[in-house]
Image (cartoon, grey):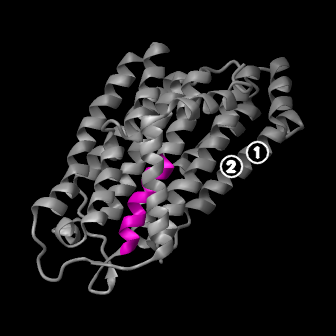
Amino acid sequence: MVRSRSPRFASSFLLYGIALIYGATGTTSLDRIAAAMTARPRDPLFVMGLGLVLVGFGFKISSVPFHMWVPDVYQGAPTSVTALIATGSKAGAFAALIRVLAVVPRGLALDGAALLWAVAAVTMTIGNVVAIAQSNLKRMLAYSSIAHVGYMLVGLVAGGAGGTGAVLFYLLVYAFTTAGAFGVITLCERARDEAVEVADYAGLARHHPLLAAALGLFLLSLVGIPPLAGFVGKFYVFGAAVRAGYVWLAVIGVLNSAVAAYYYLRVVVYMYMREPEGAATAYAPSLAGGLALAVALFGIVLLGVMPAPFADLAQAAVAPLVR
Protein backbone atom coordinates (compact mmCIF):
# COMPACT_ATOMS: atom_id res chain seq x y z
CA MET A 1 0.00 0.00 0.00
CA VAL A 2 1.41 3.35 -1.04
CA ARG A 3 1.11 6.11 1.51
CA SER A 4 0.69 9.52 -0.02
CA ARG A 5 0.75 12.82 1.80
CA SER A 6 -0.83 14.64 -1.15
CA PRO A 7 -4.41 14.44 0.21
CA ARG A 8 -3.27 16.03 3.50
CA PHE A 9 -1.27 18.59 1.57
CA ALA A 10 -4.30 19.45 -0.56
CA SER A 11 -6.52 19.67 2.52
CA SER A 12 -4.13 22.11 4.14
CA PHE A 13 -4.46 24.41 1.11
CA LEU A 14 -8.24 24.14 1.25
CA LEU A 15 -8.47 24.80 4.97
CA TYR A 16 -6.07 27.73 4.92
CA GLY A 17 -7.87 29.21 1.91
CA ILE A 18 -11.25 28.81 3.63
CA ALA A 19 -9.83 30.51 6.73
CA LEU A 20 -8.66 33.49 4.67
CA ILE A 21 -12.01 33.73 2.90
CA TYR A 22 -13.78 33.67 6.26
CA GLY A 23 -11.46 36.40 7.49
CA ALA A 24 -12.30 38.55 4.49
CA THR A 25 -16.07 38.02 4.50
CA GLY A 26 -17.03 36.83 7.98
CA THR A 27 -19.01 33.86 6.62
CA THR A 28 -18.58 30.44 5.06
CA SER A 29 -21.86 30.51 3.12
CA LEU A 30 -21.10 30.70 -0.61
CA ASP A 31 -24.08 32.94 -1.37
CA ARG A 32 -23.17 35.30 1.48
CA ILE A 33 -19.54 35.32 0.37
CA ALA A 34 -20.61 36.38 -3.13
CA ALA A 35 -22.84 39.10 -1.67
CA ALA A 36 -20.09 40.36 0.64
CA MET A 37 -17.58 40.57 -2.18
CA THR A 38 -19.95 42.61 -4.34
CA ALA A 39 -19.25 45.59 -2.09
CA ARG A 40 -15.49 44.91 -1.94
CA PRO A 41 -14.36 43.40 -5.25
CA ARG A 42 -10.75 42.20 -5.53
CA ASP A 43 -10.13 42.19 -1.80
CA PRO A 44 -6.49 40.94 -1.50
CA LEU A 45 -7.24 38.66 1.45
CA PHE A 46 -10.16 37.07 -0.38
CA VAL A 47 -8.26 36.66 -3.63
CA MET A 48 -5.43 34.94 -1.77
CA GLY A 49 -7.89 32.65 0.00
CA LEU A 50 -9.68 31.79 -3.24
CA GLY A 51 -6.36 31.03 -4.90
CA LEU A 52 -5.44 28.58 -2.12
CA VAL A 53 -8.85 26.94 -2.33
CA LEU A 54 -8.46 26.45 -6.09
CA VAL A 55 -4.98 24.99 -5.58
CA GLY A 56 -6.50 22.53 -3.12
CA PHE A 57 -9.14 21.57 -5.67
CA GLY A 58 -6.40 21.19 -8.28
CA PHE A 59 -4.82 18.50 -6.10
CA LYS A 60 -8.16 16.83 -5.45
CA ILE A 61 -9.14 16.56 -9.11
CA SER A 62 -5.51 15.92 -10.19
CA SER A 63 -5.18 18.67 -12.76
CA VAL A 64 -1.75 19.75 -14.00
CA PRO A 65 0.50 20.83 -12.26
CA PHE A 66 -0.96 19.12 -9.18
CA HIS A 67 -1.17 15.63 -10.68
CA MET A 68 2.11 13.95 -9.76
CA TRP A 69 0.67 11.91 -6.88
CA VAL A 70 -1.91 10.13 -9.04
CA PRO A 71 0.18 7.45 -10.86
CA ASP A 72 1.94 6.26 -7.70
CA VAL A 73 -1.29 6.07 -5.71
CA TYR A 74 -3.19 4.30 -8.49
CA GLN A 75 -0.40 1.77 -8.94
CA GLY A 76 0.32 1.15 -5.27
CA ALA A 77 -3.21 0.94 -3.90
CA PRO A 78 -5.38 -2.18 -4.20
CA THR A 79 -7.39 -2.01 -7.40
CA SER A 80 -10.72 -1.72 -5.59
CA VAL A 81 -9.40 1.30 -3.67
CA THR A 82 -8.00 2.77 -6.87
CA ALA A 83 -11.45 2.50 -8.48
CA LEU A 84 -12.99 4.41 -5.57
CA ILE A 85 -10.35 7.16 -5.78
CA ALA A 86 -10.75 7.44 -9.55
CA THR A 87 -14.54 7.71 -9.47
CA GLY A 88 -16.21 8.70 -6.19
CA SER A 89 -13.43 10.92 -4.87
CA LYS A 90 -12.97 12.73 -8.18
CA ALA A 91 -16.72 13.18 -8.70
CA GLY A 92 -17.11 14.70 -5.23
CA ALA A 93 -14.21 17.10 -5.77
CA PHE A 94 -15.58 18.21 -9.15
CA ALA A 95 -19.05 18.74 -7.70
CA ALA A 96 -17.62 20.98 -5.00
CA LEU A 97 -15.47 22.86 -7.53
CA ILE A 98 -18.52 23.46 -9.73
CA ARG A 99 -20.41 24.82 -6.73
CA VAL A 100 -17.63 27.27 -5.89
CA LEU A 101 -16.99 28.44 -9.46
CA ALA A 102 -20.72 28.88 -10.08
CA VAL A 103 -21.21 31.26 -7.14
CA VAL A 104 -17.97 33.16 -6.58
CA PRO A 105 -17.82 35.04 -9.93
CA ARG A 106 -21.14 36.68 -9.06
CA GLY A 107 -19.45 38.68 -6.33
CA LEU A 108 -15.90 38.97 -7.60
CA ALA A 109 -14.87 40.71 -10.80
CA LEU A 110 -12.39 38.06 -11.88
CA ASP A 111 -12.31 36.30 -15.24
CA GLY A 112 -10.62 32.95 -14.84
CA ALA A 113 -11.60 31.60 -18.25
CA ALA A 114 -8.13 32.17 -19.73
CA LEU A 115 -6.44 30.39 -16.83
CA LEU A 116 -8.89 27.47 -16.96
CA TRP A 117 -8.38 27.31 -20.75
CA ALA A 118 -4.64 26.85 -20.30
CA VAL A 119 -5.01 24.36 -17.45
CA ALA A 120 -7.51 22.28 -19.44
CA ALA A 121 -5.30 22.18 -22.54
CA VAL A 122 -2.12 21.31 -20.63
CA THR A 123 -3.85 18.73 -18.41
CA MET A 124 -5.38 16.72 -21.24
CA THR A 125 -2.17 16.90 -23.31
CA ILE A 126 0.25 15.84 -20.57
CA GLY A 127 -2.09 13.08 -19.40
CA ASN A 128 -2.39 11.54 -22.86
CA VAL A 129 1.23 11.95 -23.93
CA VAL A 130 2.67 10.39 -20.77
CA ALA A 131 0.08 7.58 -20.83
CA ILE A 132 1.54 6.40 -24.15
CA ALA A 133 4.80 5.42 -22.44
CA GLN A 134 3.20 3.33 -19.66
CA SER A 135 3.47 -0.45 -19.60
CA ASN A 136 1.58 -0.78 -16.30
CA LEU A 137 -2.18 -0.74 -16.94
CA LYS A 138 -3.01 1.01 -13.67
CA ARG A 139 -0.46 3.76 -14.31
CA MET A 140 -1.79 4.10 -17.84
CA LEU A 141 -5.32 4.55 -16.49
CA ALA A 142 -3.94 7.02 -13.95
CA TYR A 143 -2.58 9.30 -16.66
CA SER A 144 -5.74 8.66 -18.64
CA SER A 145 -7.75 9.97 -15.68
CA ILE A 146 -5.62 13.12 -15.70
CA ALA A 147 -6.45 13.59 -19.38
CA HIS A 148 -10.16 13.17 -18.65
CA VAL A 149 -9.90 15.87 -16.01
CA GLY A 150 -8.70 18.12 -18.83
CA TYR A 151 -11.77 17.21 -20.89
CA MET A 152 -14.05 18.04 -17.97
CA LEU A 153 -12.29 21.36 -17.42
CA VAL A 154 -13.25 22.21 -21.02
CA GLY A 155 -16.86 22.20 -19.87
CA LEU A 156 -16.05 24.50 -16.96
CA VAL A 157 -14.34 26.88 -19.38
CA ALA A 158 -17.50 26.92 -21.51
CA GLY A 159 -19.56 27.71 -18.41
CA GLY A 160 -23.29 28.24 -18.26
CA ALA A 161 -25.87 25.52 -17.79
CA GLY A 162 -24.73 23.83 -21.01
CA GLY A 163 -21.05 23.56 -20.13
CA THR A 164 -21.48 22.80 -16.43
CA GLY A 165 -24.27 20.31 -17.13
CA ALA A 166 -22.02 18.60 -19.67
CA VAL A 167 -19.38 18.20 -16.96
CA LEU A 168 -21.88 16.52 -14.63
CA PHE A 169 -22.97 14.17 -17.41
CA TYR A 170 -19.32 13.42 -18.23
CA LEU A 171 -18.68 12.60 -14.57
CA LEU A 172 -21.48 10.03 -14.66
CA VAL A 173 -20.11 8.50 -17.85
CA TYR A 174 -16.56 8.49 -16.51
CA ALA A 175 -17.64 6.85 -13.25
CA PHE A 176 -19.31 3.90 -15.02
CA THR A 177 -16.49 3.48 -17.54
CA THR A 178 -13.55 3.74 -15.15
CA ALA A 179 -15.17 1.60 -12.45
CA GLY A 180 -15.78 -1.05 -15.10
CA ALA A 181 -12.20 -0.97 -16.36
CA PHE A 182 -10.77 -1.33 -12.86
CA GLY A 183 -13.38 -3.99 -12.16
CA VAL A 184 -11.97 -6.14 -14.95
CA ILE A 185 -8.46 -5.67 -13.52
CA THR A 186 -9.76 -6.79 -10.13
CA LEU A 187 -11.08 -10.03 -11.63
CA CYS A 188 -7.85 -10.85 -13.45
CA GLU A 189 -4.80 -12.36 -11.81
CA ARG A 190 -1.51 -13.84 -12.96
CA ALA A 191 0.75 -16.01 -10.82
CA ARG A 192 -1.68 -15.43 -7.91
CA ASP A 193 -1.17 -11.69 -8.10
CA GLU A 194 -3.01 -8.80 -9.75
CA ALA A 195 -2.60 -8.65 -13.52
CA VAL A 196 -1.53 -5.03 -13.85
CA GLU A 197 0.93 -5.06 -16.77
CA VAL A 198 -0.40 -4.51 -20.28
CA ALA A 199 1.47 -7.65 -21.39
CA ASP A 200 -0.48 -9.67 -18.80
CA TYR A 201 -3.58 -9.28 -20.96
CA ALA A 202 -2.05 -10.94 -24.01
CA GLY A 203 -4.37 -13.70 -25.22
CA LEU A 204 -7.14 -12.81 -22.75
CA ALA A 205 -9.76 -13.00 -25.49
CA ARG A 206 -8.92 -16.66 -26.14
CA HIS A 207 -9.05 -17.81 -22.51
CA HIS A 208 -11.69 -15.42 -21.10
CA PRO A 209 -13.62 -13.86 -24.00
CA LEU A 210 -16.27 -12.19 -21.83
CA LEU A 211 -13.69 -10.38 -19.71
CA ALA A 212 -11.81 -9.29 -22.83
CA ALA A 213 -15.00 -8.03 -24.46
CA ALA A 214 -15.97 -6.10 -21.32
CA LEU A 215 -12.56 -4.46 -20.97
CA GLY A 216 -12.53 -3.69 -24.70
CA LEU A 217 -15.90 -1.91 -24.44
CA PHE A 218 -14.77 0.14 -21.46
CA LEU A 219 -11.58 1.17 -23.26
CA LEU A 220 -13.51 2.05 -26.43
CA SER A 221 -15.82 4.20 -24.32
CA LEU A 222 -12.80 5.99 -22.86
CA VAL A 223 -11.57 6.62 -26.40
CA GLY A 224 -14.95 8.06 -27.33
CA ILE A 225 -16.19 5.55 -29.91
CA PRO A 226 -19.94 5.69 -30.70
CA PRO A 227 -22.45 4.51 -29.65
CA LEU A 228 -20.84 4.14 -26.23
CA ALA A 229 -21.27 6.71 -23.48
CA GLY A 230 -17.76 8.14 -23.74
CA PHE A 231 -18.52 9.50 -27.20
CA VAL A 232 -21.64 11.30 -26.00
CA GLY A 233 -19.85 12.75 -22.98
CA LYS A 234 -17.10 14.22 -25.14
CA PHE A 235 -19.65 15.41 -27.70
CA TYR A 236 -21.52 17.39 -25.04
CA VAL A 237 -18.38 18.89 -23.50
CA PHE A 238 -16.73 19.87 -26.78
CA GLY A 239 -20.05 21.07 -28.20
CA ALA A 240 -20.53 23.38 -25.22
CA ALA A 241 -17.02 24.78 -25.78
CA VAL A 242 -17.75 25.47 -29.46
CA ARG A 243 -21.04 27.18 -28.66
CA ALA A 244 -19.26 29.35 -26.08
CA GLY A 245 -16.65 30.41 -28.66
CA TYR A 246 -13.75 28.21 -27.47
CA VAL A 247 -13.30 26.45 -30.79
CA TRP A 248 -9.54 25.94 -30.50
CA LEU A 249 -9.91 24.35 -27.07
CA ALA A 250 -12.42 21.90 -28.56
CA VAL A 251 -9.98 21.17 -31.40
CA ILE A 252 -7.22 20.43 -28.86
CA GLY A 253 -9.61 18.10 -27.07
CA VAL A 254 -10.47 16.20 -30.24
CA LEU A 255 -6.78 15.84 -31.16
CA ASN A 256 -6.02 14.56 -27.67
CA SER A 257 -8.80 12.00 -28.01
CA ALA A 258 -7.11 10.76 -31.19
CA VAL A 259 -3.79 10.45 -29.35
CA ALA A 260 -5.50 8.56 -26.53
CA ALA A 261 -6.82 5.98 -28.98
CA TYR A 262 -3.26 4.66 -29.39
CA TYR A 263 -2.68 3.51 -25.84
CA TYR A 264 -6.25 2.31 -25.26
CA LEU A 265 -6.30 0.25 -28.44
CA ARG A 266 -2.86 -1.15 -27.63
CA VAL A 267 -4.49 -3.09 -24.78
CA VAL A 268 -7.15 -4.38 -27.18
CA VAL A 269 -4.41 -5.52 -29.55
CA TYR A 270 -2.72 -7.45 -26.75
CA MET A 271 -5.99 -9.12 -25.76
CA TYR A 272 -6.97 -10.21 -29.27
CA MET A 273 -3.77 -10.39 -31.32
CA ARG A 274 -0.95 -11.43 -28.98
CA GLU A 275 -0.13 -14.70 -27.28
CA PRO A 276 0.81 -14.71 -23.59
CA GLU A 277 4.39 -15.35 -22.54
CA GLY A 278 4.31 -17.98 -19.82
CA ALA A 279 1.16 -18.62 -17.82
CA ALA A 280 -2.00 -16.96 -19.11
CA THR A 281 -3.98 -14.52 -17.01
CA ALA A 282 -6.60 -16.30 -14.90
CA TYR A 283 -10.10 -15.28 -13.83
CA ALA A 284 -10.66 -14.71 -10.11
CA PRO A 285 -14.35 -15.60 -9.62
CA SER A 286 -16.45 -13.02 -7.79
CA LEU A 287 -20.24 -12.73 -7.83
CA ALA A 288 -20.13 -9.11 -6.65
CA GLY A 289 -17.46 -8.27 -9.23
CA GLY A 290 -19.50 -9.83 -12.01
CA LEU A 291 -22.62 -7.90 -11.01
CA ALA A 292 -20.63 -4.66 -10.85
CA LEU A 293 -19.28 -5.25 -14.36
CA ALA A 294 -22.79 -5.94 -15.65
CA VAL A 295 -24.07 -2.69 -14.14
CA ALA A 296 -21.14 -0.72 -15.56
CA LEU A 297 -21.65 -2.22 -19.04
CA PHE A 298 -25.36 -1.46 -18.90
CA GLY A 299 -24.51 2.10 -17.84
CA ILE A 300 -22.13 2.90 -20.70
CA VAL A 301 -24.53 1.44 -23.26
CA LEU A 302 -27.62 3.17 -21.85
CA LEU A 303 -25.87 6.54 -21.53
CA GLY A 304 -24.59 6.16 -25.08
CA VAL A 305 -27.90 5.19 -26.65
CA MET A 306 -30.29 7.27 -24.52
CA PRO A 307 -28.25 10.21 -23.13
CA ALA A 308 -30.91 12.93 -23.36
CA PRO A 309 -32.83 12.28 -20.10
CA PHE A 310 -29.63 12.19 -18.06
CA ALA A 311 -28.16 15.25 -19.80
CA ASP A 312 -31.40 17.14 -19.11
CA LEU A 313 -31.22 16.17 -15.44
CA ALA A 314 -27.62 17.38 -15.26
CA GLN A 315 -28.50 20.75 -16.78
CA ALA A 316 -31.53 21.10 -14.48
CA ALA A 317 -29.28 20.42 -11.49
CA VAL A 318 -26.83 23.20 -12.34
CA ALA A 319 -29.31 25.73 -13.75
CA PRO A 320 -30.08 27.36 -10.35
CA LEU A 321 -26.33 27.80 -9.72
CA VAL A 322 -25.42 29.56 -12.97
CA ARG A 323 -28.29 32.03 -13.12
Quadrant in the rendering for residue 274: bottom left
Location of residue 217 in the rendering, given as x and y in whole percent from the top left corner: 32, 51
Location of residue 14 in the rendering, given as x and y in whole percent from the top left corner: 68, 49
Q: Quadrant of the C terminus?
A: top right
Kindly state the secondary structure of the residue where label 1 is placed.
helix
Q: Is residue 98 left or right of residue 239?
A: right
Q: CA distance from mark 1 to mark 2?
A: 6 Å
Three-letter amino acid code at the position of disc 1? Ile
Location of residue 57 in the rendering, given as x and y in whole percent from the top left corner: 60, 45
Q: Closest to the observer: 90 or 304?
A: 304
Q: Which mark is residue 14?
A: 2
Q: Closest to the observer: 259 or 16?
A: 259
Q: Is residue 292 magenta?
A: no
Q: What residue do we see at 58% from left, 55% from top?
A: 88
Q: Closest to the observer: 127 or 200?
A: 200
Q: What residue do we see at 40% from left, 71% from top?
A: 186
Q: Which mark is residue 124?
A: none
Q: What residue do we see at 48% from left, 51% from top?
A: 176
The furthest residue to the bottom: 192
Name above or below for residue 55 compared with residue 41: below
Q: Residues within 10 Å of mark 2 (few under 14, many from 20)?
A: many
Kindly state the secondary structure of the residue where label 2 is placed.
helix
Q: Is residue 184 magenta?
A: yes
Quadrant in the rendering for residue 112: top right
Start-end of magenta stretch? 174-187
Residue at the spot of label 1: 18
Three-letter amino acid code at the position of disc 2? Leu
Mark 1 touching mark 2, by CB under 8 A?
yes
